[in-house]
Amino acid sequence: MNLHASAPTPVDQMVEKAVIDLGIPPCPAILNRFMVETRKEEPDYHRLASIICSDVSLSASLIKTANSPYFGVRQRVRSVNDALVILGLNIASRAVAGIILRKTFPTVPNMERFWDASSRFARLSGWLTLQLDQLELAAEDAYTFGLFRDCGIPVLLKRLPSYNSVLNSANNEVELDFTQIEDAVLPTNHAMVGCVLAQSWWLPEEICLAIRHHHNRSVLASTASPPPLLSRKLIAVTQLAEHLVQQQLGLSLTQEWGKLGATCLKLLDLDESQLEALALEAAPVIAADE
Amino acid sequence: MNSVDSLTGFLNRFGCFHTAMRLAAEATGNRQTFAVIWLDLDRFKQINESFGHLIGDEVIENLATRFRPCVSGRAEISRVGGDEFVLLAPGFDRTQALQFAAELADIVQEPLHIGSLTLRPTASIGIAIHEPNEDPLTLLERADHAMFAAKSKGGNNIICSGDEPIPGRLGVTLAREELSIESTLHEALETGGFCLHYQPIIHADGTVEAVEALMRCKLNGENISPMKFIPVAEKTGVIIRLGEFSLLQGAMHARTLHDAGHETKVAINVSRAQLVSPAFTQALHAALLCSNVSPNLIELELTESLFMDISDTVQQNLKEIIATGVSLSIDDFGTGYSCLASLKDIPAGKLKLDRAFVTVLPDDRRALSVVKAVTQLGHELGMTIVAEGCENQQQIDVLLEAGVDAIQGFFYAKPMPDSELLPWLKARSHKI
């Protein structure tokens, strides 16, 4: 199928320029066009595919996402159209948002590795919800949360020269909450920045609240609402995904599992032996995603 | 006697009491404890009255279906009244019962789609843990009392008998129209149905002093009046999310205007609910960092309801806002809760006179006297005075003569979408 790129309108160009200047997509132009189409009663898949195809690397990234072992597709996905059908509109649109966000920070060093890790946690989170079906978590919510959980980090890296060293300290902190280290020296933290961004992209409230509180031990262990239980389960499942990936690949090492692991296991209703069994099952899936 | 509730298939009041007697006897024998969780739906009477008992029954049946898998194997559940459920959980201690109650509260809060309406019920929950040799009736009464305590806190709360309350989401009482607006608000939040419009504020010298960002809501092509949705958003707590959305979008737009060569301040409304939160300045900094805008291009308009009670947190937030370089203005001055003390306590650089003083001009001489006195006082304090709601040239003439520094109103411009603001500013700068 030959899919032609749709010509960007002057408004799109203006927004795209704003994206380049500001470094943060207000609601990225391509995503906006894509979302407008997905919200129609009968979305036109050809039009959606043509919007994606207007950006070569976006098309490639979406196809790569659909071919990830987490989606369990036997036959290899070769076109954007197939990818849309395989992923479904919701996952596809959030994957598109994630890819665009990642493209927005090309100048920040080590960002590629950061986004690789985020996408990996997102995909494994989605896979975990399918294994832990008693949690009644939607795979697409876990995937979306995993993808955007740390989207405040690149913003702070880009804006604050000192953030790199703050990030290192927070990653190595074994006692205090991650965000407490940020709060001690900065006027805000990556969880708040991520939440404000997620709200402006109209992500569901539970996901926004999960982003805001994802390092907060007392909130995670509390039984009071808000945030709702769904947000706490999302935090737990992605923290587990991060732990499993780190354990196996040694990527993006943090101290978070040591601080949050026990509460996460409780929220996920898992004991240590079940965790070991799950880690064994996840191993080939993580390896295949390499 | 029948012990089953016909609508839900759960135990009824009679069945509940007998089960409680059995469990109390077993618990005493085994030296084990058990918990009573008394759950009462908030606003259910209103749902019944507004939509009829059939819809009310549908809500109960839906909730019963949701409760079943969560309760199965953990507790005996009964429906003891129209909207009241009692769970008897053997072996549960206080912590486990609180966890269980929080799960139930979450289940209740999941949106219920009934016809075209989406309801988001909440529940008040009371917990009592069986004490050795306690008779079941007293135990049930304690749970019921705890539930009432939760209800009297405004609902959507969980309270353990004999314990301090555990705070929950804002409890609300809404009439039928408000319920429908609440449903619309949530739908608009999920589909991106909110945006900001901007209304210019014109300085006496003809330049644009600032633009005020005003929240607009559109759903399925229909505009929902801010007069309707803002009060509901305030009651339900949605205003915090809308407020944070405004902070980021307003700051982004200030940056867009700056890049287009217009150093125009964007004035963003801040609600009381936002400013009483210790996390407010973190959200403000997040918006400033994301938009990469200079703080001196942002002004925060404080609504009058803030002046009811200026707590330490609010004072601290105000101090920190000023320290960032963002400026403050006092909105709707002269009516409602605003008072002269606010001029002393709030480090604002701008004062916006309420439209009530403006719309009656030029005829109302007493209103004009108030305008003159407030303007003089404001100037003494080094403040800029803005008059809101100007609709004609005569009003502008008397206001400027009274010493007012800037004018906002339909006479100059209505609130407009962001796409129209830049062309408007360009056209205006050509005129000057």
Image: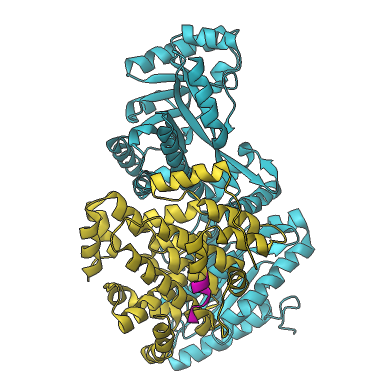
Chain colours: A yellow, B cyan
Q: Is residue B407 visible?
A: no
Q: How many marks?
A: 0
| Quarter the C terminus of chain A occupies | bottom left
Q: Give me the residue at 47% from left, 63% from top.
A: A57
Give the percent coordinates (x, y) of residue B245: 48, 47
- Determine whether, in the image, residue A33 is placed left or right of residue B282: right
Give the percent coordinates (x, y) of residue B286: 36, 49
Along the line of sight, which residue is nearer the eye, A269 or B218? B218
Give the percent coordinates (x, y) of residue B85: 62, 72
Q: Quadrant of residue B147?
A: bottom right
- Determine whether, in the image, residue B115 is placed left or right of residue B225: right
Q: Give me the residue at 40% from left, 43% from top.
A: B275
Q: Is residue A67 magenta?
A: yes
Secondary structure mostly seen in the magenta stretch: helix
Q: Quadrant of residue B284?
A: top left
- Bounds of the magenta span? A63-69
Along the line of sight, which residue is nearer the eye, A68 or B39? A68
Q: Is residue B75 visible?
A: yes
Q: Is residue B61 magenta?
A: no
Q: Quadrant of residue B247?
A: top left
Relative to residue A283, is residue A218 depicted above or below?
above
- Determine whether, in the image, residue B76 is placed left or right of residue B254: right
Q: Give me the residue at 69% from left, 78% from top.
A: B12
